[in-house]
Amino acid sequence: MNTQIFDALLDGKQPTIDEYADFVAVVEKLPIDLLWKILTEAKNLNGHLRNVTNKTLQEKIQRKNVDDALDAIVTGMTNRFR
């Protein structure tokens, strides 16, 4: 996928199945803040693309929350056994 197609999808272009697959692959690589920006600023984004962006954002937030909780446990254990 090139940036011209990605921009067109953000502007509301109906994706082909190949463009959808490429969009999913790109979205999975984006950080949380860019996913949020897409959801809040790409007002014409196709519904299927909006759903996959939202789902990816939710999954990344859940993973971040788990990672943060695990980091706190590891830090606590490290401090405990020093």
Image: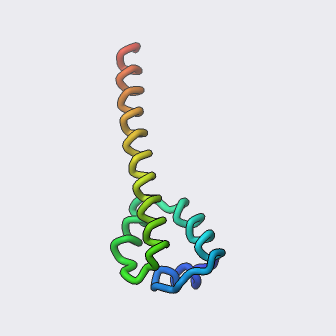
Position of the N terminus, as image quadrant, is: bottom right
Residue 59 place in picture, x, y as percent? 44, 52
Residue 15 place in picture, x, y as percent? 57, 80
In the rendered image of this protein, does residue 59 appear above or below residue 3? above
Residue 81 sits in which quadrant?
Answer: top left
In the rendered image of this protein, does residue 60 appear above or below residue 76? below
Residue 6 sits in which quadrant?
Answer: bottom right
Q: Residue at x 36, y 35 (%)?
A: 69
Residue 16 sits in which quadrant?
Answer: bottom right
Position of the C terminus, as image quadrant, is: top left
Q: Residue at x 39, y 78 (%)?
A: 42
Left or right of residue 13, residue 79 in this image? left
Left or right of residue 63, residue 40 in this image? left
In the rendered image of this protein, does residue 75 appear above or below residue 23? above
Left or right of residue 34, residue 1 in this image? right
Residue 17 place in picture, x, y as percent? 63, 75
Q: Residue at x 48, y 65 (%)?
A: 52
